Amino acid sequence: MSNRHVNVVIIGSGAGGGIVAKELAQAGLSVVLFERGRWQTPAEERKDDLRNQRTIALGAAYGPDEVRNPRVFVDPNGQAHIVSSADWNYNNNAACVGGGTVTYGAMAWRFMEQDFRMKSLYGVPEGSTLDDWPVSYQDLEPFYEKAELELGVSGDVSGDPFKGPRQRPLPMPPLPDSLETQTLKPAAARLGWHPFYIPMLRNTVPYNGRQACMRCRWCCGFACECDAKSGTQNTVIPTALATKLCELRTECIASQILLDSQGRACGVEYFDGSDHRQVQTADLVVVSCGATESARLLLNSRSAAFPTGIGNRFDWVGRNLQGHAYNGAVGLFDHDVYDDLGPGAEVAVCDFNHGNPGLVGGGMLANEFIRLPYQFINIRPPGVPRWGQAHKDFMQKWFRRSIVVMGPSQEIPIFDARVQVDPKLKDHWGIPVVRLSGTSHPHNLELSKFAADKAGLWMKEAGAIEIIRRQKTQNSLSGGQHQAGTCRMGNDPKTSVVDRYCRVHDVNNLFVIDASVHVTNGGFNPVLTIMAIAYHAANYIKGNWRGGGFR
Amino acid sequence: MKPKPRPVRAHENASPPSGLSRRRFVRRTLLSLATVPFALSTADWLKAKGGRFFTDREALALDALCDRIIPTDQYPGAAWAGVVEFIDRKLEGYHRRHQNLYRSALATLNEACLNIHKKPVTGLTEAQRDELLHQLENGEFPAMGWKKSGQKQFFDRLVDDTMQGFYGGPRHGGNRDAVSWRMLGLPEPPVRSRRPANGPSARKVTGA
């Protein structure tokens, strides 16, 4: 039995796809939203210290399935390894309804104005593909605001003098100060920095029919038990489904995008939950699978017109893979600074995102999410052994007396950090798998050192008696939860994959709407930018929809 | 403020049985304390549970090693916390692929200890077990044909699994009575309802 033709098929229900589904369904378009994972509720994925998005000791709790979805990871020595979603080198993002937004820490950063014109500000570092975005902060500002209001963001950024101009304050206030915030905020101010409350996609008061955060210690990496964390799975996707125009099909994996004889996208081939091959035709195709899987889907969609994959005429699909190296410092104190109040991350400074002498960009610094005991075992000062009584003493003495300040440093993209499809290995459905290879730009190491220096200063001012630096020391490939860059947005089809509205240059009814399109990834968690881009692109699609067809 | 250590078990604070001198009582108590981990946890578990991966001998050898990785002080150590059961469950479930690693390593260790010390791993003193672990950590355990990399691989696995079993959530068979969380001063069960929260809320969205 064939599927009924629809206006739009969207592949991937994460930050990007969920929003596009809601926007287009509300505009009256019929939508099928595909997700390779399933609905996962906090009740079934109980707070498991050893099995969550951040700790994979007992596997990847939020998918994808470890056996059916291998990848190939090529290490810096050129050695290829087959990896599963329970290996860090898999660079996993969750595969479930809502994608990464189910389990993320939920920092809701707007990029700064400068983040959209890195090339103009800094030039192009040797060996890099640094460039400006074809859109500006001002273009995205209304869409950032829309994401903040519709999904729900709390915090107070009024103390941040470096932010781009904004029309409205955040819709919810920050949580009351934790002990860490009481320690760190005055210390940053004494240093002449500008601390403020991190914007978070998290209810701090009842909002949008969901309740406020109850401040438990299982936050970043876990589905929220009380649904206070705002993801697409508890905001825009239910809204899309309520229109009756959007159908969500879970446990379906797309194998390729189909083209008609005129070279326009006409649907998608996929395998349903029973492994049956099916086709869903549509007027418009939106790819929102995250930077690794979106690139894979384009590369696997080959035809006479696109022998190396759709949109890949100039070999830019899968290039410029970037995530974030996290850098900072751990401070050990002579008194308790732990109050068991989640989510933990509360206070940040953006003093070091730009304008750092001799550096290209920088990044924000913030206190880390609340740590669980198993996550703490390797936060040891040099000299403390991994085991034995001395390690147990360390745990007892310092668990409640430590603060971690970290932040993502904006990465300098390079052409050879990339997603390819493996020539040999196929997944459970016979689809060629992702092959990750490459390194990162050497300048990232300087940024790491700089961030660790600044975090150390902050710790010292806050009264830490011992400081442990945490910084990237190897030029390793970067992807993971913050994966971005593989289908770059640009005006020139020769050096980018999609245009400023996320439309693939060569195919006028095919869109890529997720972090793949990010030219650069900011010195911030990228999710709110993915959301803003999704609203921006959806707005364009709605505006150019002409009764039953696109343009 | 740290919570008080767990109350001692019944047999630990028994009053001196009549007919024992004070010295003999003290000595006997110390001896029994030295075997507390075995007496309280792993041995009971061995009696109670069928269908395990480890043989009794393997489980007791592992117990003796884990208890040096996280020893008993004013708080119980890894063995009391059920780390051996945790590892066993893991090898029967999620980490079947590590079964051989444990089986062959424990066999090699036992055999080598019988050669060197004329005792199995369970008969070694604490200092001897510490030395054994240090040798494994550096890949220098004197066992014929056991490569440096193989020793380190086993040691890394053993330490990480012990940490998981002791500091992870109790649901997987380790961290009995959330002992490590209490040790670290974490309220257990965790403080709830700082804000109105009574489990998962209905998926009700008023519309965006």
Image (spheres, rainbow, N blue to C red):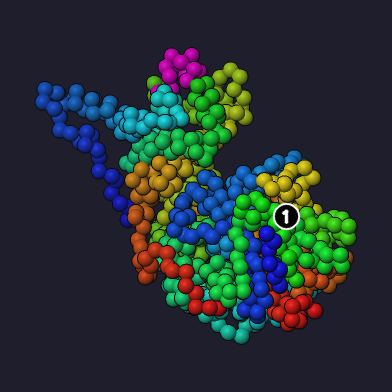
Q: Mark 1 packing: few (<14 Cα in 10 Å), some, or many (20+)?
A: many
Could you say which is closer to the camera, residue A37 or residue A214?
A37
User: At x 55% / y 28%, what residue is drawn?
Assistant: B100
- Image mark 1: chain: A
Amino acid of disc 1: Ser
Q: Is residue B119 magenta?
A: yes
Residue A297 is at least partly visible in this image = no
Q: Position of residue B126 (x, y in %)?
A: 40, 27
Residue projecting furthest to the front: A1
Could you say which is closer to the camera, residue A367 or residue B181?
B181
Q: Position of residue A297 (x, y in %)?
A: 74, 57
Q: Position of residue A425 (x, y in %)?
A: 74, 43
Q: Which residues are magenta?
A: B109-122
User: At x 79% / y 66%, what residue is drawn?
Assistant: A265
Q: Which residue is mark 1?
A: A255
Please determine whether, in this image, residue A67 is positioned above or below residue A467: above
Please determine whether, in this image, residue A139 is positioned above or below residue B177: below
Q: Quadrant of the C terminus of chain A?
A: bottom right
Q: Position of residue A358 (x, y in %)?
A: 74, 64
Q: Disc 1 on helix, strand or loop?
A: strand
Q: Is residue A222 left or right of residue A411?
A: left
Q: Is residue A514 magenta?
A: no
Please determine whether, in this image, residue B163 is positioned above or below residue A27: above
Please determine whether, in this image, residue A329 is positioned above or below residue B148: below
Residue projecting furthest to the bottom: A167
**Count the marks: how many?**
1
User: At x 46% / y 55%, what residue is drawn?
Assistant: A44
Residue projecting furthest to the left: B18
Q: Quadrant of the N terminus of chain A?
A: bottom right
